[in-house]
């Protein structure tokens, strides 16, 4: 097929850096029939490309399915007198949530069959799943078009029927029950899709009568609500990228006014948990990498230090239990779990030798000495342990089954690249044991590097289809993520953002220079803000990569961040800067992939989008593809696939998601000649 050509309609943006003509600005109008026609033409063109490789797609899809135990059950989670579990069944896309009185009978009573709820919908995403304190009701929500507006329903678990209460178009800002289960707290979005308003719903009453509990009119702040682990308090949090504040109210007195813990201050972040007669506060007050404080419940603003700040040890999460705290932190580019008892003694849990991810499992009970943790690496599937924090005895609960996989056939290790300013940047690599490290192998590099989000070294059965074909997979950890503490994050945001891209390019060079990749067979992949990463790397060094996969990429950053009417823009200024004024106008322009797409021989490119995506709107990748087609001087394929009924996460069912991944992996294999 002939590649689609988007029409050119001049539109002038007035910027501090000077006027610029954007011939594809019209694609932001989704009501324009030409917009839909163009997206559908791109879809048809991509489908034609993949039709020529259907045999490989089917082979990869079959491999993915063969490595998944399609009929499976999660590790039952103890919650008061019940055990809850999730099951999957071969041939069905979604989970079934169930429960029983013992771990062995956890499948006995169906709580929610998501397959049944998804019937008749092309897209279905489950939102909240919140059991009432007495376990008689379930509050649950769903999104049926990918726009991330969730309708809340309440189910009577004795009768298996829905109550008349339906709360439409809520946000994914959390929920909380009152102690007696008569009230449900939830969050509404504003016109820019920002969670901003906490409401209280009395069961059995009209939604129109729901009461506003809290509202935040500052457009930088996202609002959330949830219950404390003890179940005794309802927590309302409001946070921007740089500051936060928390309000609390007793779950036993849900109609009382919430109490402010501490008023927001610039650059002050904190979160609150309940721990007996105290609140536990995790904060960056006088602690760049955070410390842990306590305060009496009757005086939540009077903080006293419990765990001091340790530079380079970034505390990211604290779970409270009746007699101890579980602390999750990053140290030396590795996640760690530590337990601290009320007497001040501590113990650190054992971990794998290779780079790995350690995280909290589902810990629903408060008064227990059992801590559930999850461990995995790029060569070890997700494994759940129950750890007795007193005896330190670990019990293997479940390892994710991987049928038809020889786990000993893969080996992972950590490398270090050197950035242009001398900073050492970690990169984790995994390969098949038969793949040589001699400069001949194709390699796929993955990266993200934004929002202090740390991409863990997780296991993936999908990835094995690359490894088995001799492709080496590399995971970069550039500045802008959170792996190296708060300074690692601030070193890759705002006016330091280019470090994220140059760090990743340094990793790419290191992989080639040390024989992990053939210089002409290196690809790069990232999604959302990671799509910005790969777009910036590609436009900075078009000849470095043979293939680029950009999933829902944030690539028209100057235009989007200049428009405060778009969803989420104002909240993002603290991450990227506001390009409506200098110095951000020039700095952001220097790396914006769309603005820096100039005549060049670009790699093979595969870009995805979601028509209903509220985070990275479809027109950013659409405009980028149009410009790449206009100015690209090479002959390698440029493809775009837009999900016309989905959003940021792509297809919702697991089989659709696997097939989507099979297409992407096929593109990579073709482009890297693997």
Image (spheres, helix red, strand yellow):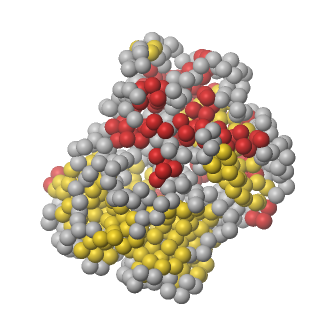
Q: Nearer the viewer, residue 547 or 347?
A: 347
Please name the residue shown 31% across and 43% down the image.
220
Where is residue 104 shown, x and y percent of the image?
53, 82
Q: Nearer the viewer, residue 247 or 674?
A: 247
Q: How many marks?
A: 0
Where is residue 590 shown, x and y percent of the image?
51, 27
| Left or right of 182 in this view: 349 | right
Where is residue 319 shown, x and y percent of the image?
41, 71
Above-or-below relation of 7 to 487: above
Would you say residue 224 is visible in this rendering? no
Q: Quadrant of residue 383?
A: bottom right
Q: Nearer the viewer, residue 619 or 588?
A: 588
Where is residue 231 shown, x and y percent of the image?
30, 74
Q: Quadrant of residue 140?
A: bottom left
Q: Quadrant of residue 45?
A: top right
Would you say residue 16 is visible in this rendering? yes
Please name the residue shown 59% across and 19% down the image.
598
Quick one: quadrant of the N terminus?
Answer: top right
| Left or right of 134 in this view: 357 | right
Quick one: quadrant of the C terminus?
Answer: top right
């Amino acid at each position: 097929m002939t590649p689609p050509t988007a029409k050119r309609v001049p539109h002038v943006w007035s910027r501090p850096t000077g006027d610029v003509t954007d011939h594809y600005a019209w694609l932001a109008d989704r009501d324009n029939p030409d917009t839909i026609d163009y997206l559908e033409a791109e879809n048809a063109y991509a489908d034609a490309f993949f039709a020529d490789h259907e045999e490989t797609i089917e082979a990869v899809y079959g491999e993915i399915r063969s490595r998944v135990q399609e009929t499976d059950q999660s590790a039952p989670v103890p919650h008061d007198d019940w055990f809850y579990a999730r099951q999957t069944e071969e041939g069905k896309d979604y989970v079934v949530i169930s429960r029983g009185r013992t771990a062995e009978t956890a499948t006995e009573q169906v709580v929610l069959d998501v397959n049944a709820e998804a019937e008749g919908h092309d897209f279905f995403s489950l939102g909240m799943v919140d059991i009432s304190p007495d376990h008689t009701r379930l509050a649950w929500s769903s999104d049926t078009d990918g726009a991330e507006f969730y309708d809340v329903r309440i189910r009577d678990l004795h009768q298996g029927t829905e109550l008349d209460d339906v709360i439409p178009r809520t946000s994914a800002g959390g929920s909380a029950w009152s102690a007696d289960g008569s009230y449900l707290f939830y969050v509404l979005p504003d016109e820019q899709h920002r969670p901003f308003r906490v409401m209280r719903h009395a069961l059995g009453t009209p939604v129109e009568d729901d009461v506003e509990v809290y509202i935040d009119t500052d457009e930088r702040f996202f609002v959330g609500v949830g219950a404390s682990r003890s179940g005794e308090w309802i927590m309302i949090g409001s946070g921007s990228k740089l500051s936060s504040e928390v309000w609390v109210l007793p779950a036993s007195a849900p109609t009382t006014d919430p109490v402010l813990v501490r008023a927001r201050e610039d650059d002050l972040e904190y979160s609150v948990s309940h721990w007996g007669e105290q609140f536990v506060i995790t904060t960056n007050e006088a602690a760049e990498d955070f410390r842990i404080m306590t305060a009496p419940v009757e005086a939540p603003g009077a903080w006293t230090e419990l765990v001091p700040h340790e530079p380079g040890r970034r505390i990211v999460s604290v779970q409270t239990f009746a007699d101890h705290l579980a602390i999750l932190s990053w140290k030396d580019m590795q996640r760690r779990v530590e337990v601290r008892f009320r007497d001040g003694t501590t113990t650190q849990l054992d971990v794998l030798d290779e780079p790995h991810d350690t995280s909290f499992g589902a810990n629903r009970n408060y008064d227990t000495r059992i801590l559930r943790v999850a461990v995995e690496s790029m060569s070890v599937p997700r494994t759940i342990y129950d750890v007795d924090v007193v005896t330190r005895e670990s019990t293997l609960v479940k390892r994710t089954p991987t049928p038809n996989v020889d786990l000993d056939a893969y080996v992972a290790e950590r490398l270090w690249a050197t950035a242009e300013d001398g900073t050492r940047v970690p990169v984790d690599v995994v390969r098949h044991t038969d793949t040589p490290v001699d400069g001949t192998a194709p390699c796929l590099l993955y990266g993200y590097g934004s929002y202090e989000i740390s991409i863990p070294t997780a296991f993936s059965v999908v990835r094995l289809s690359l490894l088995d074909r001799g492709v080496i997979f590399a995971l970069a950890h550039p500045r802008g993520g959170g792996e190296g503490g708060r300074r690692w994050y601030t070193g890759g945001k705002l006016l330091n953002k280019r470090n994220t891209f140059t760090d990743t390019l340094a990793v790419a060079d290191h992989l080639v220079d040390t024989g992990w990749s053939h210089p002409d067979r290196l690809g790069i992949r990232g999604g959302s803000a990671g799509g910005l990463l790969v777009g910036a790397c590609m436009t900075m060094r078009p000849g470095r990569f043979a293939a680029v996969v950009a999933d829902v990429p944030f690539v028209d950053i100057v235009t989007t961040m200049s428009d405060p009417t778009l969803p989420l823009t104002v909240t993002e200024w603290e991450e990227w800067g506001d390009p409506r004024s200098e110095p951000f106008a020039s700095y952001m322009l220097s790396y914006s992939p769309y603005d820096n797409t100039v005549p060049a021989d670009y790699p093979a490119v595969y870009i995805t989008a979601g028509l209903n995506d509220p985070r990275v709107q479809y027109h950013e990748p659409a405009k980028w593809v149009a410009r790449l087609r206009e100015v690209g001087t090479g002959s390698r394929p440029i493809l775009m696939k837009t999900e016309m009924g989905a959003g940021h996460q792509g297809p919702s069912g697991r089989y659709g998601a696997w097939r989507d991944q099979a297409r992407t992996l096929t593109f990579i294999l073709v482009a890297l000649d693997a």
